[in-house]
Image (cartoon, grey):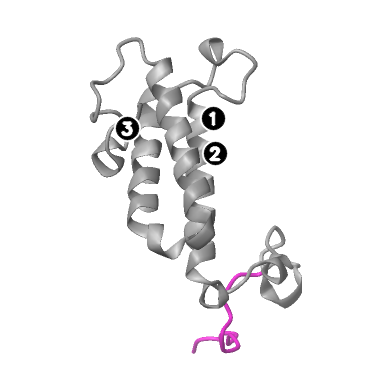
């Protein structure tokens, strides 16, 4: 005859830990700071995504360092990808960005110019990162 097995309450993960409400100790209470995505306006999600791409591209270009040419994190291949993704996002979302569209485009163009300056052999006009979406950047 087998011994009775303990039953789990509905919604239990089957994990045992000492944290309150069955949450993992490292994540207990973090849900208070997280908004449900269904309550966030789309323009805010698009804008935050664009800012994240801009920041990451600037880092990969070494622009956060005193001397971008010697920045240990400089990676032009990664920067190209991020700038191209940013260009696609901004170009396809410009109608939704309202008054922020101009600033987003200016930031994108600044990154495109910085990429061209950082390149040992700059791309031909119209073939730089994101230029298939934005057109040539001077």
Q: Which residues are magenta?
A: 1-16
**54 w.r.t. 102: above or below:** above
**82 w.r.t. 76: above or below:** below
Left/right of residue 11 with respect to residue 84 in the rendered view: right
Image quadrant in which you'd find residue 127: top left
Q: CA distance from mark 3 to mark 2?
A: 16 Å
Which percent across, then down, holds residue 97?
Answer: 47, 60
Number of numbered tags placed on the structure image: 3
Left/right of residue 22 with respect to residue 3 in the rendered view: right
| Callout 3 secondary element | loop
Q: Which residue is mark 1?
A: 59
Question: Is disc 3 in contact with disc 1, using a CB cutoff of under 8 Å?
Answer: no
| Callout 2 secondary element | helix
Question: Is disc 2 in contact with disc 1, using a CB cutoff of under 8 Å?
Answer: yes
Left/right of residue 132 with respect to residue 38 in the rendered view: left
Which percent across, then down, holds residue 92?
Answer: 33, 56
- Specify few, some or many for label 2: CA neighbours under 10 Å numbering under 14, 14-19, or 20 or more: some
Q: CA distance from mark 2 to mark 1?
A: 6 Å
Whichever of labels 3 and 2 marks the residue nearer the N terminus, that label is 2
Q: Which mark is residue 55?
A: 2
Question: Is the magenta region chiefly helix, strand or loop?
Answer: loop
Q: Which residue is mark 3?
A: 129
């Amino acid at each position: 005859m087998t011994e009775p097995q303990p039953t789990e309450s509905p919604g239990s993960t089957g994990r045992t830990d000492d944290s309150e409400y069955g949450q993992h100790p490292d994540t207990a209470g973090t849900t208070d700071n997280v908004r449900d995505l269904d309550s966030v306006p789309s323009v805010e999600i698009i804008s935050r995504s664009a800012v994240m791409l801009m920041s990451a591209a600037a880092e990969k270009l070494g622009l956060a360092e005193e001397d971008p040419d010697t920045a240990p994190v400089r990676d032009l291949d990664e920067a190209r990808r991020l700038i191209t993704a940013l260009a696609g996002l901004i170009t396809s979302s410009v109608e939704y960005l309202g008054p922020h569209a101009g600033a987003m485009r200016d930031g994108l163009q600044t990154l495109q110019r910085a990429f061209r300056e950082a390149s040992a052999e700059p791309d031909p006009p119209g073939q730089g990162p994101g230029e298939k979406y934005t057109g040539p950047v001077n």
